[in-house]
Amino acid sequence: MEKITIPEKWPKNITYHSEICERHTYIKDGLEIVKPIQMMMVDGELVCPRCELEKEDDKLQEAIQRRYDELLKRKNYNTFYNLSILSDKTILAATLDNYEVEHQEARMNKRTVVESVARFKDGQVFNLVLQGNQGAGKSHLAYAALRELNESELNASCLFVNVESMMRTIKDSFNNKERKHTESYFVELMSKVDYLALDDIGAETGAIGTDKVATDFVQRVLYAITTTRQDKSSIITTNLSSETLFHMYDKKLVSRLFRNPKFVVFKETKDKRMNNIPF
């Protein structure tokens, strides 16, 4: 039989032949060949049957992984586009590119959001808090950030939830036991996604410009959601100041909303929805 070159790390006192697969030759105590795999001729080529089986197994595993990745991507896509709760359907067209910057503050804030998305993609965990004037485009940027994360190679699961709309939906389930959109449904759904946007915090109480405080129901729902997301990133949008938020909600809840925060504050950006009003 034809001899083959023996690798330096193999024992020198053993003769190896090409009819034995080097990859599947097991050495016991540096001397004895244990259960050698005999090579076989296939279409004029000498091959190891076990190597060929392993190649087929690898191909099958790759096909299974590709299918799994496709299903996961479809599931995450459906979660974002079908389960998000919007108060304004025009936001569906929001992207980072089509956010209009009319002055320095808007330009800087957009840049901060873009940089934050890059940090999210890098695996950093923090809460992005967009606060300031109504109509400045906070919801636009929050939705656009989630879209970028959802459609990127990261393939993250994302959910955009307008808080006031969610609370109304939950209340509707109180008198209809067949509705699935219950408090526990939303808490579970929002705890699982990689990235969550809680849009327009404070508006659900109707407390803007008043001294009202959030009801026990509202605080309970938000507290449950934020508690389950202490190891995940969230995006918060609100028109309210920190002083108002601390008055409106329990301090522990606000602390969770502002956990490890990156603040994006709109002071000068005007309400884009009012630009065409002539009086």
Image: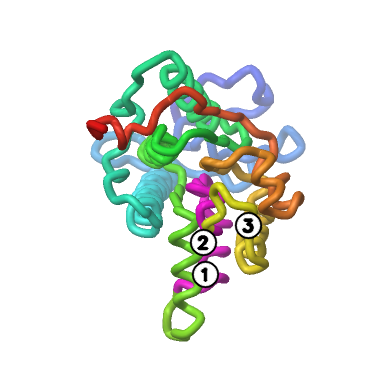
Q: Nearer the viewer, mark 1 or mark 3?
A: 3
Q: Which residue is mark 2?
A: 189
Earlier-in-chain disc, 1 versus 3: 1
Asked whether disc 1 touches disc 2, contact meaning CB atoms under 8 Å apart, the reply is yes
Image height of 51 relative to 177, above or below? above
Q: Secondary structure at mark 3?
A: loop
Q: Which mark is residue 212?
A: 3
The answer, for residue 118, to whether it is visible in the render is no
The amino acid on which the numbered mark 3 sits, given as a three-letter code, is Lys
Q: How many marks?
A: 3
Q: Which residue is mark 1?
A: 185
| Residue 192, magenta (yes or no) | yes
The amino acid on which the numbered mark 1 sits, given as a three-letter code, is Tyr
Residue at 44% in and 38% down:
134
Say which of 154 and 245 sits in front. Answer: 245
In the displayed structure image, the side of residue 128 where residue 271 appears, left or right: left
The answer, for residue 130, to whether it is visible in the render is yes
Q: CA distance from mark 1 to mark 2?
A: 6 Å
In the displayed structure image, the side of residue 178 where residue 214 appears, left or right: right
Say which of 5 and 237 sits in front. Answer: 237
From the top left corner, tell me how far across and down residue 213 is, in percent: 65, 58
Residue at 49% in and 37% down:
20
Image height of 12 relative to 233, above or below? above
From the top left corner, tell me how far across and down residue 126 is, in percent: 63, 35
